[in-house]
Image (cartoon, grey):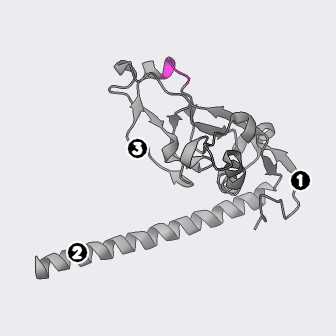
Amino acid sequence: MFGDPLSNSKGYDLSDYGSLFELNAGGTPSKNKPEYWENGNISWIGSNMCQDTILYENDGKYITELGFNNSSARMFPKNTVLVALVGATIGKTALLKFETTTNQNVLGIRGIEESGNNPYFVFYYTQGLHKFFMDISDGGFAMASKGFISKLPFPIVDISLQNDFADFVKLIDKSKFIVQKQIDDLQELLDSKMDEYFG
């Protein structure tokens, strides 16, 4: 719909991430201070959660308010696009659907709607730039930075087209969820029948 993001095959005018969005990495409270972690109620996630997916909940890690206030952890609001900065998940993304902090290996792209863009469009477009991240490593350990991401090209696309695209992918995601639910229900029925006949 928007062409190849690596080559800008549709010939859009280009800006860059640093000019359009607020870019910030997260932080990790000291693991040597139990009071920063025990009985915490502030969501905290790592780069392992960036798997080109939409995130609706964290994976069970929380920090305390004391840990948040005494670290470089940063709160990212709903509709922030996250990008993993290092290792096996470098360049992988996530679209937040809840408020959370992250570790320092994750960069948050904030202020998307304020810049006149749609979070779903930014999320999927950023996935299309994955090769740029792969080119950093040249076969070795890879690490991206805020400066690197700030210079990545971003197309100036009319918000109405972005919104149409977002509506389309939401519909596809909903259809995939329904089909998966049907598959899960059928598997559960099959398992119960197998137990009934052979258990």
Spot occupied by residue 69 in the image (x, y as percentages of width and height): 50, 18
Provide the major secondary structure of the magenta segment.
loop
How far apart are the two marked residues, 2 and 1, measured between alpha carbons? Answer: 55 Å
Q: Which mark is residue 128?
A: none
Secondary structure of the residue carrying tag 1 is loop
Spot occupied by residue 48 in the image (x, y as percentages of width and height): 49, 45
How far apart are the two marked residues, 1 and 3, measured between alpha carbons? Answer: 39 Å
- Asked if labels 3 and 1 touch by Cβ distance under 8 angstroms, the answer is no
Mark 2 or mark 3, which has the lower sequence index?
Answer: 3
Q: Which mark is residue 13?
A: 1
Secondary structure of the residue carrying tag 2 is helix
Residue 161: name its quadrant. bottom right
Q: Which residue is mark 2?
A: 191
Q: Left or right of 175: which side holds 2?
A: right
Q: Which residue is mark 3?
A: 59
Indicate the amino acid at tag 3.
Asp
How far apart are the two marked residues, 2 and 3, measured between alpha carbons? Answer: 28 Å
Give the camera-side residue of 123 and 148: 148
Query: Who's the residue at 89% across and 53% down the image?
Result: 13
Q: Farthest residue to the left: give it.
A: 199
Indicate the amino acid at tag 1.
Asp
**Region in magenta:** 68-72
Please tell me whether residue 70 belongs to the stretch shown in magenta. Answer: yes
**As drawn, 179 above or below 138:** below
Q: Farthest residue to the front: give it.
A: 139
Q: Left or right of 177: which side holds 107?
A: right
Query: Who's the residue at 43% across and 18% down the image?
Result: 66
**As drawn, 13 above or below 197:** above
